[in-house]
Every structure is written in C-alpha cells, then in structure tokens.
Image (cartoon, grey):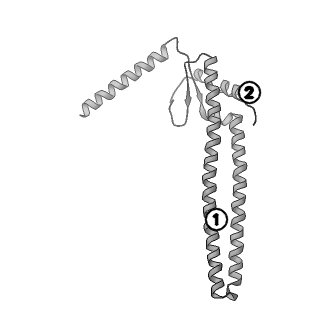
C-alpha cells in the first residue's frame, strides 16, 4: 500500500513538473506575478477603506466607553447609597445593574460582529476592484496568467523580472476614484 502511494505521488510530481516545465519554457506563454501584500497595502482604495473602517471603529468604541461609564456611575451611586436603601430598593438596583451589564455585553458582541462584517465587506470590495483591474491589465498586456504571491507561499520562488507589482500598483492607483 505504501509503495503504491509513493509511486502515485512520484507520478503526480513528475507530471506536475513536466506541466510547469512546459508552461515556463513555452514561448507563447506570457506569465507574471504580483506581490498581493504590497499591492493591497499600496493601493489607495485599500488605504481609504482602512481609514473609513478605523473611523467607524473609533465611533463604536466611543459608544461602548460611554455605556461602560454610565454603568460604572450607576454602580458607584449604588455603593454610595446602599446603606440607606430598603431591601426592595437594593434588589431592584442590583437587578437594574445586572441588566445593564448584560445589555452592554450584548451590545459589545453585536458591535464586534458588525465590525467583522464591515471589515470583510470593505476588504472584499477592494479585492474585487483589484481583481477586475488585474483581469483588464492582463488582457491588455496579453498575459495568459498573472499569479499572486502571498505570505501563504503559493509562489515560493519566481524571477524578479516576472514581478509586475509596481507597474500594476501605479495603474491601479491612477484609475482609483475616491468614493
């Protein structure tokens, strides 16, 4: 069983190497790659999207801070006046504080989910813009394929002459229109 698995893996490796060899040395193929991190970090659309997201998170955090301060003030008032309260007033105040703290926790969770969804939406929008530009660029420049190098290592080595990141980034930023 192990030998047949090894044989299959060797055959797959040989076939994939042959395909890559053919693609690389085929004169009719025009290939390039972009550094996706450099491209996204340098793209004005991503910079603006991050700034918009950051502005929203500041507002959301300010709301959370305000609610937290209100709860702390109510807690301090309760602790200050607890000695003068009847048993019924203590119970009502404790229940109110508990409810407010639960509401704050629920609000924080809702904001966290909203922030995550907003971040995903903004990022997805920018990536769609970049991909559309790359498709247009690839057609205009007669590329058969444009690969994206990421930190995940889908391209572990390529000659620098195949890197078109700077050229694409210049064109992408040139075409960018602020919303």
Query: SS of the residue at dot 1?
Result: helix
> Residue sitting at 41 percent across and 22 percent down?
17
Image location of residue 92, percent across then percent down: 64, 80
Crowd tier of the residue under label 1, counting other residues whose Cα lies within 10 Å: few below 14, some 14–19, many 20 or above: some
Q: Tag on residue 18?
A: none
Q: In the rendered view of the protein, which quadrant contains the N terminus? A: top left
Q: In the rendered view of the protein, which quadrant contains the C terminus? A: top right
With respect to residue 120, does 40 lie above or below?
above
- Quarter assignment of residue 21: top left
Residue designated by label 2: 174
Left or right, 26 with respect to 102, comes to left
Tag 1 or tag 2, which sits nearer the N-term?
1
> Residue sitting at 60 percent across and 62 percent down?
106
Image location of residue 156, percent across then percent down: 50, 30
Residue designated by label 1: 104
Left or right, 142 with respect to 74, comes to left
Image location of residue 172, percent across then percent down: 69, 28
Image location of residue 66, percent across then percent down: 72, 64
> Residue sitting at 60 percent across and 33 percent down?
36
**Real-space Cα separation, disc 2 to disc 1, in angstroms:** 45 Å
With respect to residue 35, does 95 lie above or below?
below
């Amino acid at each position: 069983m192990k030998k047949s698995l090894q044989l299959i893996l060797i055959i797959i490796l040989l076939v994939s190497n042959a395909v890559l060899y053919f693609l690389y040395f085929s004169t009719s193929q025009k290939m390039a790659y972009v550094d996706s991190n450099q491209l996204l970090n340098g793209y004005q659309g991503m910079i603006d999207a991050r700034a918009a997201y950051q502005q929203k998170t500041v507002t959301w955090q300010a709301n959370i801070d305000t609610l937290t301060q209100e709860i702390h003030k109510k807690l301090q008032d309760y602790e200050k006046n607890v000695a003068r309260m009847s048993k019924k007033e203590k119970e009502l105040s404790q229940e109110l504080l508990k409810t407010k703290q639960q509401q704050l926790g629920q609000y924080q969770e809702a904001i966290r989910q909203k922030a995550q969804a907003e971040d995903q939406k903004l990022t997805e929008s920018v990536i769609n813009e970049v991909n559309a530009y790359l498709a247009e660029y690839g057609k205009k420049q007669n590329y058969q394929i444009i690969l994206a190098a990421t930190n995940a290592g889908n391209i572990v080595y390529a000659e620098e002459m195949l890197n078109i990141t700077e050229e694409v980034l210049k064109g992408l930023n040139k075409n960018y229109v602020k919303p």
